[in-house]
Image (tube, helix red, strand yellow):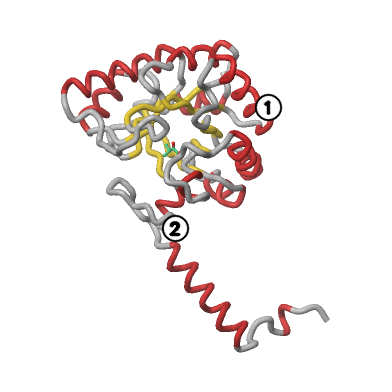
Amino acid sequence: MNKKIKKILIKKNKSKIVCLTAYSKSIAKILDKYCDVVLVGDSMANVLYGHKNTHQINLDTIIQHTISVKMGVKKTLLVVDMPKGSYTTINLEKKNAKLIMKKTGCDAVKIESDKKNYEIIEELIKIKIPVMGHIGYTPQFKKKFKIEGQTKSEADQLLSDAKSVEKAGAFSIVLECLSSKAAKSITSKLNIPTIGIGSSSYCDGQILVTDDMLGISGFYPKFVKKYIQLDRVIEKAVKKYTREVKTKKFPSRKNIFK
Ligand code: KIV
């Protein structure tokens, strides 16, 4: 088994797993010092490309960003989202997952579940491609945002989904926007680590979209904590640059070649 995956697995019930997204080398290099997992998420569709959902991002774009991220990652487990439409049949998913692994040198892929595509995970495990599952609010399959698992029957269904993902061979599972109760129950009943986003502190680890927690995405649902308002910091610098260019303060003698 991949050593980085082993390190994630042994954290269950011992210490929290720290995960964030990255789409480029410069951010990945910083995350690599602190995170256990860096995810090249298809959230780049909204965050970087301005799409209204994650559906239109294609495999080539994900691969290009992962090649950049990989340059910044040394110790952290690198996981890549399989975009919508890239795993609709078993042959297609095998071909595309192999392509992602070969072109990027990542450690694993992440697959969103539609409550029935567990065989897709099984088939990748058979060809030794590690898979992170993803249940709950799964943007590739759900049209409307909703907290999942608020009723007993929904929570039971989610637990059954999570168990199917584990049984199929996933090494961990993202729980997106689950009620605290459902997240707690799933985390205590699975042997693989759960990574929460908007799913309470009961999960074995947490993930956020980095641009959200830095305050530059413009998307801040309740579960996002903004650790800095980086948009303000950037604006201040751009404003100063503009002023200095206009007043000819920049470039100064220090910034020119003699
Ligand atoms: O695409 C993404 O960034 C994700 C995380 C939010 C889990 O799937």
Q: Position of residue 13 (x, y in %)?
A: 34, 26
Q: Which residue is mark 1?
A: 102
Task: Say if 178 sits above or below 69 in the image.
Answer: above
Q: Earlier in the sequence, mark 2 or mark 1?
A: 1
- Looking at the rendered image, the quarter that the C terminus falls into is bottom right
* Ligand 1 has an atom within 8 Å of the beta carbon of the residue at disc 1: no
Q: Quadrant of residue 117?
A: top left
Give the numbered dot on residue 81.
none
Give the numbered dot on residue 216.
2
Determine the CA span between mark 2 and mark 1.
32 Å
Circle 1 SS class: helix
Say which residue appears at 34% left-offset and 30% top-offset: 175
Q: Position of residue 198 (x, y in %)?
A: 31, 40
Q: Is residue 63 left or right of residue 36?
A: right
Return the residue found at the far left. 152
Q: Position of residue 51 (x, y in %)?
A: 47, 47
Q: Quadrant of residue 99?
A: top right
Say which residue appears at 59% left-offset and 33% top-offset: 59
| Closest to the observer, 221 or 224 | 221
Amino acid type of the residue tagged 1 in the rendering = Lys
Task: Say if 244 sits above or below 63 in the image.
Answer: below
Task: Say if 37 sits above or below 26 in the image.
Answer: above
| Closest to the observer, 150 or 12 | 150
User: Where ligand 1 lies, by quadrant?
Assistant: top left
